[in-house]
Amino acid sequence: MSDFSQLVDDRPAEGIFRVHPDVYSDPQVFEFEQRYVFERTWMFLGLESQIAHPHDYLLAWIGRLPVLISHGADGVRRAFLNVCRHKGTLLCRLESGNRKFHVCPYHGWAYDSAGRIADVKDQASGAYSAGFAREDHNLVPLGAFASYKGLMFGSVSAEVPPLAEFLGELRFFLDLAMEQGPQGMEFVPGRVGFTYRGNWKAQLDNSSDAYHLTSTHVSFMEVQRRRADLVSGNQEARQFDWKRRFEQQGGAFTFKNGHNAIWLNQSESSKRPIFSRIDEVRERLGPLKAEWMLRLRNLTVFPSMQIADSTSLLIRTFRPVAVDETEMRYYCLAPIGEAPEVRQWRLRQFEDFFNVSGFATPDDTTMYEDMAVGLRARQIDAVQGYYRGMADCVQGADEMARTAGVTPVSSVQGQFDLQAETWGHALYREWSRLMASGAEAERAAGTAGAR
Amino acid sequence: MNPATYGAIATRLLYREAALLDERRWDEWLALFAQNCEYWVPTWRNEEQLTEDPQSELSHIYYASRAGLEDRIVRIRSGRSPASTPLRRTMHSVTNIEATGLSGESMAVRSSFVNHIFDPHHRTTVSVFGWYEHTLAYGSGGWLIARKKVVLQNDQLPAMIDIYCL
């Protein structure tokens, strides 16, 4: 499969949006999307607050490429491949820390925190040829690296638009997460990682998918109903009345470059940690942002970073390992300097809903693994998961977007049970575009299939 | 009581807990825990350090009372959780049991575990391993679990991990 143009059947005039199962299940498609998607667009790498001080560093991944982000002595953060130039060994072996110099454990080459070669061990006695002196020994920098509101992004390819342009109108929704704390935002210590045996796009979709809640998460609702009597069940996580939630208005926006956001009005905003600080937020940012922060919002920065702001605030990244294997990483995002009792409450609601050892996520991942089996069926020519809401979807901004001052590519709104799926159009149009432009660029450069 | 007696009590209780989980005797398993028990599965902060404070750091699971455990059983029994249908088959193996901090009313027990988890749906097996720290307390109901801490040594988790796998 080298012609990817037929995999996403996108005919808006006819009301058709179909995605071929190969997009999720073909190992060859997977190999190409490593190059054409993951290595040709901006990828979320971490928070600036994770490397707040000079010489702090952090490891990350872009697809299968190991990345090192380092805070230099000059205060500048930079991102490199975490690969020693001598023999290609991984340079750093611990995922975070503070190092003035990174010394490769194999042959001892040392790099400073700005990625420059500091020492080639025993260079003077090495009888190196003149050719060696002409080699670039410094760490290989990413093609692009930039931050937005404390979120660090990098791109292997230098041929990407400026980060602010890439994020575009989605920035309003990123602000709603990243501006919650007057002193900035941080990850709460503690890592949650898991691996599911399914394609990364199952997770890509699911974060925006309101349609599955009333079927996949019924057991969680049952637990919540039982807790709601305030006598039984864990009372440390506040309970939401799902009946009232289903009466709320909600919607979905698509944005340029593959991003999307969904929202739902919140009937019980007092049950969310942000509510305890909403007066401060209103004073600092104005009533519009305060009002939006109290809505439930999930957003996706294509292709592999998501923020969910519902019972608690989550940043999720995923790393495709194989066509049917995906490594997940969940982070609990919180305001720096948050009151201890609010932090505790935030943690309990995060663990309850989001953790893979909690009440919701394992039911999702179980579906992802079943999809990986089902989508191997060659007899199925398309999935039908991106049709809901199409008939009501408008181009550009709806009333809700206009009040936010945001101009999406498309908008749709309705009562909860609309559960629109039009967010998928942004994802698969961008996927399709990157696959086509990646193939075209390699053809032009004469490197197609060269790896 | 002499230390050996404490050890025997601890061993009996831990073996019983393992068997009740494997045999899905949920009510009897819940009855091993004190009403105000703490149940804690800390996350790792990084490769080398375990989190230390469930009130300021993220846990895999943290419950400040038995009610949290009861919720898990409600979910398992609901029949409406895809991750629990079919239930995994488990085999809890508890070894290296050591009772310390002995007093008339309580003891601290450290043990090692290797739990094998079979998914009859996808026909795959995973294992989780690490150590348990139980605090056992003696009351009117006999010896009960007042605190259980599960340190997961392999913390890159599979796609689902439920209370009966730990």
Image (cartoon, coloured by chain):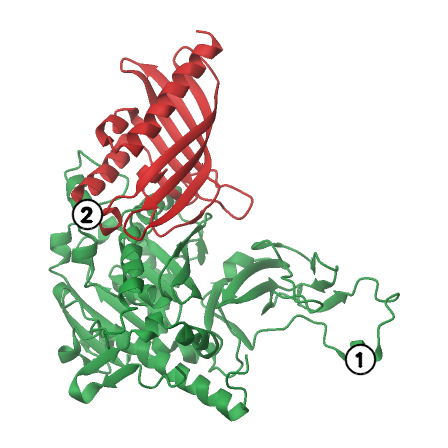
Chain colours: A green, B red
Look at 33% across and 49% down and name the residue there: B160
Q: Position of residue A114 (x, y in %)?
A: 66, 67
Quadrant where the image shows the C terminus of chain A:
bottom right
Task: In the rendered structure, find residue A219 and report the number of the disc placed on it.
Answer: 2
Q: From this view, report whether residue B165 is shown above or below residue A61.
A: above
Task: Let me know if residue A234 appears in the view.
Answer: no
Task: Let me know if residue B119 appears in the view.
Answer: yes
Report which quarter residue A54 is drawn in: bottom right
Nearest to N terminus: mark 2 or mark 1: 1
Q: Position of residue A230 (x, y in %)?
A: 17, 37
Look at label 1 and name its amino acid: Gly
Look at label 2 and name its amino acid: Ser
> Of helix, strand and loop, which one carries label 2?
helix
Label 1 Cα crowd, 10 Å radius (few <14 / some 14-19 / many 20+): few
Which is closer to the viewer, label 2 or label 1? 1
Q: Pointer 1 indicates a residue of which chain?
A: A
Q: Position of residue A176 (x, y in %)?
A: 34, 64
Estimate the spatial distance between the alpha carbons at disc 2 and disc 1, rounded to whole Å: 66 Å
Q: Position of residue A21 (x, y in %)?
A: 29, 73
